[in-house]
Image: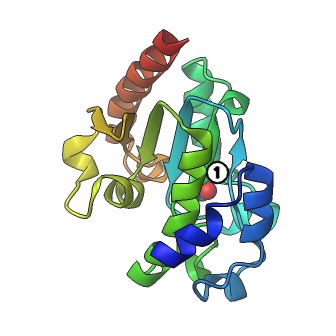
Amino acid sequence: MGNELESLNSISSMENLKKKAFDCEWCSLRKGCLGVVFGEGDANTDLMFVGEAPGRSEDEQRRPFVGAAGQLLDKILTAADIDREEIYITNTVKCRPQENRFPQPEEQKACFPWLVRQVQLIEPKIIVCLGSLATKTILGPESKVTKMRGEVFRRKGINIIPTFHPAALLRDSRKKYPVWEDIQMIRDKYRALT
Ligand code: URA
């Protein structure tokens, strides 16, 4: 990823980074989706959320987390008194894999420089990894969200906190309470910063 990340180093605003991503050809996903779902929210925030990859609704609207999982995430954020506009939300992979399949390792790798540059520009104090792919991508391939959720891992001065993906909560309601506990802890940590 050295050369790709280097090619993004001169881009110093999120808007310009987003524009550059529209023409990305680092993997073949862009050819099979409607558009790049780059991310949205406050690029000066201390609190960033990273999911997996866009689904159909996200691809259609070019916005992260607007489908069923996103609506649940919105409810969780509202319950925790976190305004979606005060955080930044993105995905590990920015283009929708067809049929919502899991992104391939080469697609994950190809997309990683975009996430790295987003983190460099935002300089968040807290990154919440939603689900397995974000957790493994940010904390390393051996990481397991089931074991690590709700714990804080310090990397390069950033607090990284994995929790279950909201789509997992839709499949298994027993995961709701652990996520609720995690999100309250995240909220308290975030509020204590300001
Ligand atoms: N799931 C994700 O991981 N990201 C989205 O944007 C939507 C659903």
Q: Quadrant of ligand 1?
A: bottom right
> Along the horizontal axis of the image, is 111 left or right of 33?
left
> Along the horizontal axis of the image, is 186 left or right of 88?
left
- Horizontal and vertical percent for residue 72? 58, 40
Identify the residue shown where x is 63% and y is 33%: 87
From this view, report whether residue 15 is shown above or below residue 46: below
Q: In the figure, residue 10 lies in which quadrant?
A: bottom right
- Horizontal and vertical percent for residue 71? 65, 43
Identify the residue shown where x is 60% and y is 17%: 81
Whether disc 1's CB lies below 8 Å from ligand 1 is answered: yes
Identify the residue shown where x is 61% and y is 31%: 75
According to the picture, the residue beneath numbered tag 1 turns out to be: 65
- Horizontal and vertical percent for residue 77? 58, 28
Give the secondary structure at mark 1.
loop
- Horizontal and vertical percent for residue 174? 32, 39
Q: In the figure, residue 98 lies in which quadrant?
A: bottom right
Identify the residue shown where x is 47% and y is 30%: 125
**How many other residues sit within 10 Å of disc 1, few (<14), some (14-19) or many (≥20)?**
many
In this view of the protein, which residue sits in the foreground, 65 or 177? 65
In this view of the protein, which residue sits in the foreground, 65 or 7? 7
